[in-house]
Image: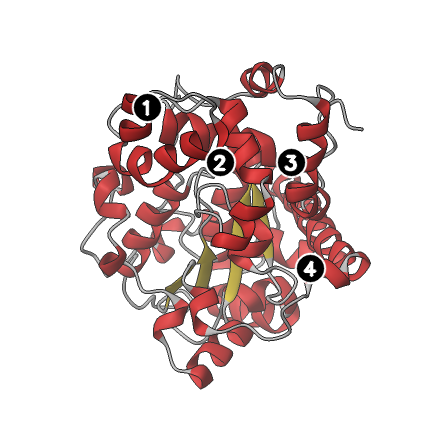
Amino acid sequence: MNGTISGYLGSMFALAEMYDSVMRRSPFGVDICCRKGSRSPLQELYNPTQVRQQHLLCFSSVLGDKKPSLTTRHKWLELSNTAVLHQMRRDQVIDTCRANSAVSRKRRVLTPNDLKHLVVDEDHELIYCYVPKVACTNWKRLMMVLTGRGKYSDPMEIPANEAHVSANLKTLNQYSIPEINHRLKSYMKFLFVREPFERLVSAYRNKFTQKYNTSFHKRYGTKIIRRQRKNATQEALRKGDDVKFEEFVAYLIDPHTQREEPFNEHWQTVYSLCHPCHIHYDLVGKYETLEEDSNYVLQLAGVGSYLKFPTYAKSTRTTDEMTTEFFQNISSEHQTQLYEVYKLDFLMFNYSVPSYLKLE
């Protein structure tokens, strides 16, 4: 099946590139060849034969007997490898869920409230589960472009704070139960993941070391200092703006924390935010191959010829080397307990145990 999928995807993308002028006549409207309903990202992934026939009929008047060039055939091979890679990622999630069913499927039924991280794009039949600290600001910008029906064209012109305004995007929990089920069955579902501890350090740096994040300092910083710091000063207890990483880790592994309330979304596990053991994700993108995976999603959605994932060098990005430094002062006991909290994310998304960890 993979070979068929790969061959079709390569053919379709080559056609889209060769006849860019046809595909770009009305980027956000109804295309002359591929009208809404004639193709979908899911069809392209799982029913390639039917859609290939539609596209060949659509472009036959333009193509004639023209054969693909060597460059095009190389692109087909590239896309074939990409299709295999994403099948492996899907399989990894499925296998991990089966092997850890007692933990991963504690809840047999999801409620609408569990779906508040799943952003819906009706026009392109997409569902994106956003994970904070995994390029979700830029992906929300992209979703605003996709769902804006011409209101936006350049994602980077959308201010970051506007991308996080809940009213600007529709999430799956806003639909009725039958509507939810229909979209989960019919739309292409995707998410992006990141090495769990690198994501955790990124969340800590952003929320506890930046002076402007006073709301996090007040809500979480004061609580962490009160519980984890002996002889804390009154100022520290009042402001909560100088939480140490060791205190943050101690807070996360404290059983009282987990009984009290769910983790904040910025350090919640991906399997708890997106429920990949209950929801079958068609594509798992990775932060480590962010641009490549993001543009693959956009290609599948049929918008890759005119919409690309924003690229820019972020000098403050949390790196593996930085993460290693943060964990140097964490005891092996606490490292082991923290790994257990995020273990499913490591296994599910095929991240190896970090070499700097001293697990007991």
Find numbered disc 3 in the image and state the secondary structure of the residue it sits on: helix
Residue found at the very far front of the displayed protein = 231
Q: Earlier in the sequence, mark 2 or mark 1?
A: 1
* Residue 299 disc label: none
Check disc 2 and report the residue beneath it: 291
Q: Earlier in the sequence, mark 3 or mark 2?
A: 2
Check disc 1 and report the residue beneath it: 236
Check disc 4 and report the residue beneath it: 104
278 or 124: which is nearer to us?
278
Q: Nearer the viewer, mark 3 or mark 2?
A: 3
Determine the CA span between mark 3 and mark 2. 30 Å
Q: Identify which residue is drawn at 28% across, 48% down.
A: 164
Residue 260 visible somewhere in the drawing: yes
Determine the CA span between mark 4 and mark 2. 29 Å
Residue found at the very far left of the displayed protein = 151
Find numbered disc 2 in the image and state the secondary structure of the residue it sits on: helix
- Identity of the amino acid at label 4? Ser
Q: Do the residues under discs 1 and 3 have CB atoms within 8 angstroms?
A: no
Residue found at the very far bottom of the displayed protein = 178
- Identity of the amino acid at label 2? Glu
Q: Nearer the viewer, mark 2 or mark 1?
A: 1
Quadrant where the C terminus is found in the figure: top right
Q: Is residue 20 left or right of residue 41?
A: left
